[in-house]
Amino acid sequence: MVTKAAAVTAAGAGAAVVRALGAEGRAWLPGRCAGLVGRGDAAREAGALERLDRTAAALAAAEEGDRDRLRAVHAVMWQGEFAALLDAAGTADERDRLLDELTALVRDVDAA
């Protein structure tokens, strides 16, 4: 079960991913995000990269009036991805490491 604090962190990370996709100077984001989601599993990393590509393409193709709604939809999707990752953590230490990584991801997106 994901705690309230973990859910807040997952929500922040989901929003950060959507904010950062396609932004200049953030070419590092897909690899880092896929690595986080994949946790060393090449197939899961490839799947995450595909989902990131679909998110970026959808945002790029969105008409101006639809862009905010689409950002919100994709932010919730990525929030769910990160919440599921946290929920699947085998130990409290692993969950804490994931929370630290998600927090660092948000910090780095905001700093870029």
Image (tube, grey):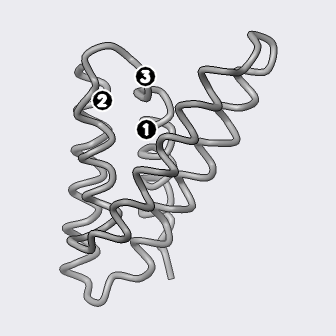
* Amino acid type of the residue that numbered disc 2 sits on in the rendered structure: Val
Q: Mark 3 belongs to which amino acid?
A: Gly
Tag of residue 56:
none
Q: Quadrant of the C terminus?
A: top left
| Mark earlier in primary sequence (1, 2) | 1
- How far, Cα to Cα, is label 2 from label 3? 12 Å
Front label number (2 vs 3) = 3
How far is the residue under mark 1 from the one under mark 2?
8 Å
Query: Dot 3 surroundings within 10 Å: few (below 14), some, or many (20 or more)?
Result: some
56 relative to 17 in the view: left or right: right
| Residue for badge 3 | 22
Say what secondary structure mark 1 lies in.
helix
Image coords of residue 72 (percent x, y):
67, 36
Is the Cβ of the residue at disc 1 closer than 8 Å to that at disc 2?
A: yes
Q: State left or right for residue 58 relative to residue 8.
A: right
Residue contact between numbered discs 3 and 1, judged by CB atoms under 8 Å: no
Residue picked out by circle 2: 109
Task: Identify the residue at image location x=41%, y=71%.
Answer: 85
Helix, strand, or loop for circle 3?
loop
Residue drawn at x 65%, y 31% is 58
Dot 2: element: helix
Residue carrying label 1: 17
Q: Give coordinates of residue 9: x percent, y percent.
A: 41, 53
Instruction: Tell me what residue is drawn at x 49 percent, y 72 percent.
Output: 84
Residue at 40% across, 50% down: 49
